[in-house]
Amino acid sequence: MITSTHVHPQANGQAESNNKIIVNNLKKRLDKKQGRWAEELPVVLWADRTTSKVATGQTPYSLVFGTKAIIPTEVVIPTTRYLLQDQENNDKILAQDLDTIDELRDLAKIRIIAHQQRITMA
C-alpha cells in the first residue's frame, strides 16, 4: 500500500528523508563527474536498496524479493557465494525465501515499531 500522499502526510516525511539520503549520496559521487547524474543514479539507487536499514534490520531489496541481492561486482569478480550457486540449488533457496518472506516482513514491522518507540522516548 502506498502511503506517501496528501492522505497520509506522516509518510511524506519518510519519503523526503529517504530522498535526501539519495540526493546526498548522488552529490558525493558527482564531485568529479559534473553533469553526469543520470549515469550515476542507478548506482546510487542500487546501493540504497541493498543497504540494511537501522529501522528494519533488512535491505529494501530483501523485503521485496525475500532474498539477498547479488551485486554486479560479484558477477564480474565471483565470490564464493556466487561460485557455489547452481540453478537447482538456487531455485530451492528462492522457494524457501518466498515461504518465509511474510515472517521477514513481520519482523521488520516489529523492528520499525520498536525503533519508532526508541526515537520518541529519546
Image (spheres, grey):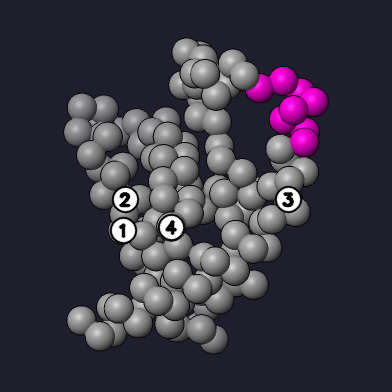
Sequence-wise, which precedes: disc 4 or disc 1? 1
Q: State if disc 2 and disc 1 touch (CB < 8 Å).
A: yes
Mark 4 lies on residue: 57
Specify whether 35 is left or right of 59.
left
Predominant secondary structure, magenta span: helix
Nearer mark to the viewer, of 2 and 4: 4
For marks 3 and 2, give the CA distance: 32 Å
The residues colored magenta run 85-92
Residue 20 disc label: 1
Mark 2 lies on residue: 23
For marks 4 and 1, give the CA distance: 20 Å
The percent position of residue 28, horizontal first and vertical second, equals 23, 39
Q: Residues within 10 Å of mark 2 (few under 14, many from 20)?
A: some
Mark 3 lies on residue: 98
* Residue drawn where x is 41% and y is 50% of the image: 52
For marks 3 and 4, give the CA distance: 18 Å
